[in-house]
Image: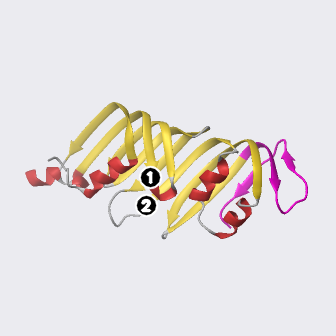
Amino acid sequence: SFAGDDPTIASIFAIFRGGTLTSFSFAAGGRTAGDLGAFEGMSIHAVLADGSVRIASVGLDLEEAQGDVAVERAVLSAEHAAARIGKSRASNGSVRIGLAANDDTLRVEATVRSDLAELPGILSRAVRGGSFHEELSLVEDLAGSATARLTLENRAGALETKVSVSEMELSARYRRLPWPIRIRSGSFFYDGN
């Protein structure tokens, strides 16, 4: 079968779970006829609409995904990406995921309009360990919305998360304080430090 046993092809279908390709192109090249079936010599470009996407390494399941997708040299990339995560929406996104067995390339960047009630569950999967998890567990009854630029990137085997919130309105209880918190506007930056 055409690249059916290739682990990189299996990786692609582990990420893209469904959707519609409104445009698709495929090219393969090599020095011999046998090279045409080698994944490293293939170039795939598509436009995804209404997709279902899973980024397992950060526990993100995206619905209504759309964007310009390419696979070249065993790296999956997406530009002009947008998707929904629960009630939250991501837009103006870009994605790079290494598909080869020894390639841990991961970079996800997007503007996110978030329903803050869902945010602790998403962040607990996307931000690894450390004091952030401890502090997040102290937040209760979180409600409101925020707009932020989110960047997730694997660097030397460690997931780095950056969040730059440009707009927010929230209410919550924070167990370190005896009274409820309410923020009507403001900004916030987190870079993992």
Quadrant that contains the C terminus: bottom right
- Magenta segment: 166-193
Judging depth in this view, the residue of 109 and 56 nearest the camera is 56
Identify whether 156 is placed above or below 125. Answer: below
Residue 34 is situated, as x and y percent measured from the top left of the image, at 10, 54
Label 1 vs 2, first from the N-terminus: 1
Q: Nearer the viewer, residue 114 or 185?
A: 114
**Per the image, is 189 magenta?**
yes
The Cα atoms of the two marked residues, 1 and 2, are separated by 7 Å
> Looking at the image, which residue is at 49% across and 70% down?
156
Does the stretch in magenta take in 34?
no
Task: Tell how many labels.
Answer: 2
Q: Quadrant of the rendered structure where residue 101 is?
A: bottom left
Residue hosting label 1: 96
- Label 1 with label 2: CB-CB less than 8 Å: yes
Tell me which residue sits at (23%, 55%) in the image: 6
User: In front: 33, or 18?
Assistant: 18
Q: Amino acid at mark 2?
A: Thr
Q: Residue at x 32, y 60 (%)?
A: 100
Mark 2: secondary structure: loop
Q: What numbered label is drawn on residue 192?
A: none
